[in-house]
Every structure is written in C-alpha cells, then in structure tokens.
Amino acid sequence: MLLINLDYQTRVPIYEQIVREIERYVALGILKPKDQIPSIRELAGQLGVNPNTVKKAYDLLESKQVITTISTKGTFIRESISNVIEEKKNSLLEEITERFQELEKLGMTEEEIIRRIKKS
C-alpha cells in the first residue's frame, strides 16, 4: 500500500501532490526500480479521489519517465530513475534558495539561518 498524504487546504492540485509524493518516494529509495505501484483505480480508492485525477498524475509521471505501464501487468517504477532523483534534488535546492532569500529579506543573516536550521 502506497501512503500518500493529500492536503486539501493547499492550492496545489491533487494530481500534482500525487506526483510529488511518488517522486519523493523514488528519490528517498522507498520506491525502487521495477517496483509495482497501485493501479489507477486502486490508488483512487485508497485516496478517495476521482480515478481521472490519479490518471492525470500517472500520465505526468510517465511523461517524466518515472513510471511505465505494461499492458495487463501493471504500472512500475522505471529501471533508470537517476534523472528523477537529480530533478528532485534540484527542485528542493530551488525551494531552499527561495526560502533562504526570503529570510534574508526579513533581516536574518546567513549564519543565523544556518545555525537555526542545524538546531532543528
């Protein structure tokens, strides 16, 4: 069972949240190459969302070459996913850089930001 937490309070569409969670699991090594993931209907049932929402997420994951669907066998994590891990790292670094810049605009020094991050 794939545990995906959805946040209905955010403006991020549900299908994007599904994509992010699956990419995160791949990047963390929780989902490995050749691992089978739930079918569209199965995941939609688990999450309580419309199957079209999950299909949209899976289509996006296929276009990003994270997953592949084999007719009559299921949907699997692709064998070569190093690009996914690298993209996730770059995405996280961009987010961190933006937050870092916001904190500096609020008057925090670089040293203070780093110290507080290490502390938490």
Image: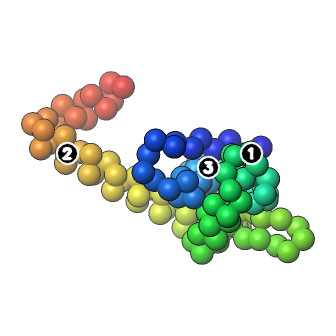
Residue 91 position in % (x across, y down)? 41, 58
Q: Quadrant of the N terminus?
A: top right
Q: Amino acid at mark 1?
A: Gln
Residue 40, compared with residue 29, is above or below; it is below
Q: CA distance from mark 3 to mark 1?
A: 17 Å
Residue that badge 2 annotates: 102
Query: Which mark sits nearer the N-terminus, 3 or 2?
Result: 3
Residue 29 in view (yes/no): no
Residue 116 position in % (x across, y down)? 27, 28
Tell me the residue at 33%/56% (across/down).
Answer: 94
- The numbered dot on residue 25 is 3
Q: Amino acid at mark 3?
A: Tyr
Residue 103 in view (yes/no): yes
In this view, the residue in front, 98 or 110, is: 98
Hey, which residue is sitting farthest top in the picture? Answer: 119
Tell me the residue at 85%/74% (across/down).
Answer: 71
Hey, which residue is sitting farthest left in the picture? Answer: 107
- Colour style of the rendered protein structure: rainbow
